[in-house]
Image (cartoon, coloured by chain):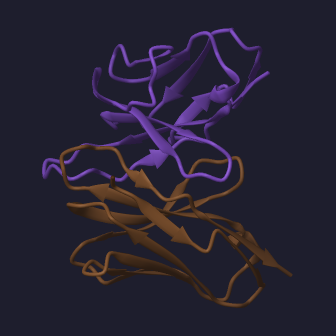
């Protein structure tokens, strides 16, 4: 079964600090991996998207890395802000012609002042 | 606003009642997806359309669930004889199919939160 596992489940950090979220996946074959940010009660919003040939992708203070050999990805948030408080979901797109995405359960990040 | 919209945003119903949700995708997007998300979990795929054709349905989509996209634009998701276990956020997403065969980026709507009492 294709799965996406994320860790930690939840994380509390102080404003201004950095943090790294982890994602391990077993989806195969694999087309691309995305990180989404989901505010409470809202739909997910895409942060980054990487194909299997890309190792890193940045979007402002967000930097995603991908190791397709070990099937691991990380999302690093630099100089966190209160508005970063949200769930961060790792999403993998299989390369099987199926158009649906496989979502992780997310990491709930809380940034405190 | 040219994003994905969903209506209603919240729905409270009694067990056994039928409910219908609507999704309006980004206008030029030909693919439309429905997902269900329960608290603390990531979204789970329900079904997707390319234009008006429903191309895939998840095993999560029991016979009480039906989705339509009659003109290839907006879509409706109906749940008949609702059960308490149907309580969840129902998310709609749309994308533009690329010629390469790779999935285009999916843009999500704000979701409809269903509470079945």
Name, please, the residue furthest toward the left: B100
Give the residue drawn at x 71%, y 91%.
A17
The quadrant of the image that shows the N terminus of chain B is: top right
- Nearer to us in this view, A94 or B112: A94
Q: Is residue B42 left or right of residue B106?
A: right
Q: Is residue B29 left or right of residue B117?
A: left
Visible residue check, residue B97: yes
- Nearer to us in this view, B69 or B19: B19
Residue A25, horizontal then vertical, whole percent: 37, 67
Q: Is residue A108 left or right of residue A4?
A: right
Give the residue drawn at x 28%, y 44%.
A99
Shade representing chain B: purple
Which image quadrant for residue B114?
top right
Residue A69, horizontal then vertical, whole percent: 25, 81
Give the residue drawn at x 38%, y 34%.
B32
Name, please, the residue furthest toward the front: A1
Query: Is A77 rendered above or below residue A37?
Result: below
Q: Is residue B51 left or right of residue A19?
A: left
Shade representing chain A: brown
Residue B96, horizontal then vertical, whole percent: 30, 43
Visible residue check, residue A59: no
Q: What is the number of callouts on the image?
A: 0
Give the residue drawn at x 20%, y 53%.
B102
Query: Is A74 rendered above or below residue B105?
Result: below
Name, please, the residue furthest toward the right: A113
Residue A35, horizontal then vertical, whole percent: 47, 66
The quadrant of the image that shows the C terminus of chain B is: top right
Query: Is A55 rendered above or below residue B108?
Result: below
């Amino acid at each position: 079964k294709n799965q996406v596992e994320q860790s930690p489940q939840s994380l509390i950090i102080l404003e201004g600090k950095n943090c790294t979220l982890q994602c391990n996946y077993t989806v195969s074959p694999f087309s691309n991996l995305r990180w989404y940010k989901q505010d409470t009660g809202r739909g997910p919003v895409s942060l980054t998207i990487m194909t299997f040939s890309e190792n890193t992708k940045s979007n402002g203070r967000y930097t995603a890395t991908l190791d397709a050999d070990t099937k691991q990805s990380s999302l690093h948030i630099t100089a966190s802000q209160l508005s970063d408080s949200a769930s961060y979901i790792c999403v993998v797109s299989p390369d099987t012609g199926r158009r649906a995405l496989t979502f992780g359960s997310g990491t709930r990040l809380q940034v405190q002042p | 606003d040219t994003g994905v919209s969903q209506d209603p945003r919240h729905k409270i119903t009694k067990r056994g009642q039928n409910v219908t949700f609507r999704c309006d995708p980004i206008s030029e997007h030909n693919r439309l997806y429905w997902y269900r998300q329960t608290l603390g979990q990531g979204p789970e795929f329900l079904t997707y359309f390319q234009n008006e054709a429903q191309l895939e349905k998840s095993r999560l989509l029991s016979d009480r669930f039906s989705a339509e996209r009659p003109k290839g634009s907006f879509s409706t998701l109906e749940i008949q004889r609702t059960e308490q276990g149907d309580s969840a956020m129902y998310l709609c997403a749309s994308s533009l199919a690329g010629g390469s065969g790779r999935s285009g980026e999916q843009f999500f709507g704000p979701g409809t939160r269903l509470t079945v009492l």
